[in-house]
Image (cartoon, rainbow, N blue to C red):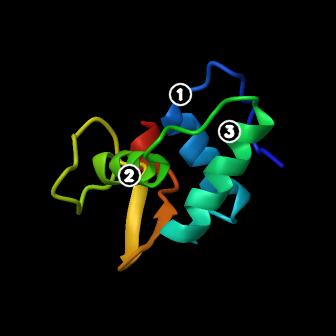
Amino acid sequence: MTTIDLSKNSTMLQIVMTAFENLGGRATLGRAYLEVGKILRDLGRSAPNELEAEVRKIIYAYCPTSELYKSEGEFFIKCRRGEYQVKRPTLDDLL
């Protein structure tokens, strides 16, 4: 079950975000990898050869506490080692 409309052309960021939403907004990396793989199959897309590395790269790029953070948006929060959650927007984010 996907919570937003995805298409075959959806970006990996959109797919990873949807995976987390499907898992209740918070998940271990292992559960995220499985859900991303399922979404890709449902979309008729093949998974990248290094699916786990690709998912981690996306999470780290959008998690401000990560050394790989890109400053292009804060979409994930690290809960503890190997577990992340989707950052919910605050009123300040929306203004």
- Residue 28 can be seen in this image: no
Residue shown at 72% from the left, 23% from the top:
7
Where does residue 33 sit, x and y in percent of width and height?
56, 58
Instruction: Please tell me the numbered disc located at residue 40.
Output: 3
Q: Nearer the viewer, residue 76 or 81?
A: 81
Please name the amino acid that badge 2 sits on. Ala
Q: Secondary structure at mark 1?
A: loop
Instruction: Please tell me the numbered disc located at residue 53.
Output: 2
Q: Spot the residue most to the top.
A: 9
Nearer to us of marks 2 and 1 is 2
Please name the amino acid that badge 3 sits on. Leu
Tell me: 7 left or right of 28. Answer: right
Where does residue 15 sit, x and y in percent of width and height?
60, 40
Real-space Cα separation, disc 2 to disc 1, in angstroms: 16 Å
The residue singled out by tag 1 in the image is: 11
Tell me: 2 left or right of 33. Answer: right
Q: Quadrant of residue 79?
A: bottom left
